[in-house]
Image (cartoon, rainbow, N blue to C red):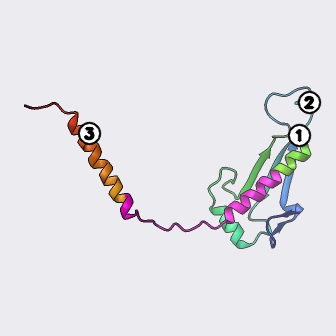
Amino acid sequence: MLKISNNVQLAGWEIEISAIRAQGAGGQNVNKVATAIHLRFDIERSALPIFYKECLLKLSDQRITKEGIIVIKSQKFRTQEKNKEAALERLKELIQAATAQQKKRRPTKATKGSQRRRMDKKTQRGQTKTLRRKVDY
């Protein structure tokens, strides 16, 4: 059971977790122990509310396949349990980020004082450049 928000929870049957061998350099156990976690979550088959499903499917994330399956691989830690927790946490963050409302941008206007200071700097810079020119007698 993964709690997304107060009202939304994911059941255990919705999340498919399998253990795989981790990549990269390792010690004695690298070829023997499957500590990395491969998490798969089917958006269409899940019991998420329709709003959540739509937001996730609109999201352009490389972890979401064309078929609407979220694939997360976790191999940061040495133990399978910690990698499982990390993968579930990343799934939770992805779902929450997809449904977060973007703050609407309010266009701002430059103040009169800032406009005046900008123009004064431009004229001062221009005067400096004219003083550097060749003197004509």
Mark 2 to mark 1 CA distance (whole Å): 10 Å
Q: Earlier in the sequence, mark 1 or mark 3?
A: 1
Which mark is on residue 128?
3
Considering depth in this image, is 76 or 39 the residue closer to the camera?
76
Q: Decide: marks 1, 3 in contact (CB < 8 A)?
A: no
Q: Decide: marks 2, 1 in contact (CB < 8 A)?
A: yes
Considering depth in this image, is 114 or 63 the residue closer to the camera?
114
Q: At label 3, which amino acid type do we have?
A: Thr
* Residue 27: x %, y % from top left: 88, 26
Relative height, residue 119 to residue 56 (above, below): above
Specify the quadrant of the image occupied by residue 83: top right
* Residue 11: x %, y % from top left: 87, 65
Which residue appears at 66% of the width and 62% of the height?
A: 57
Q: Residue furthest left?
A: 137
Which residue appears at 66% of the width and 68% of the height?
A: 54
Q: At label 2, which amino acid type do we have?
A: Asn
Considering depth in this image, is 119 or 65 the residue closer to the camera?
119
33 to the left or right of 43:
right
Question: For the magenta stretch, what is the residue range?
Answer: 87-114
Which mark is on residue 35?
1
Relative height, residue 114 to residue 106 (above, below): above
Dot 2: element: loop
Q: Quadrant of the image for the C terminus? A: top left
Which residue appears at 69% of the width and 72% of the height?
A: 51
Specify the quadrant of the image occupied by residue 125: top left
Dot 3: element: helix
Considering depth in this image, is 133 or 66 the residue closer to the camera?
133
Q: At label 1, which amino acid type do we have?
A: Thr
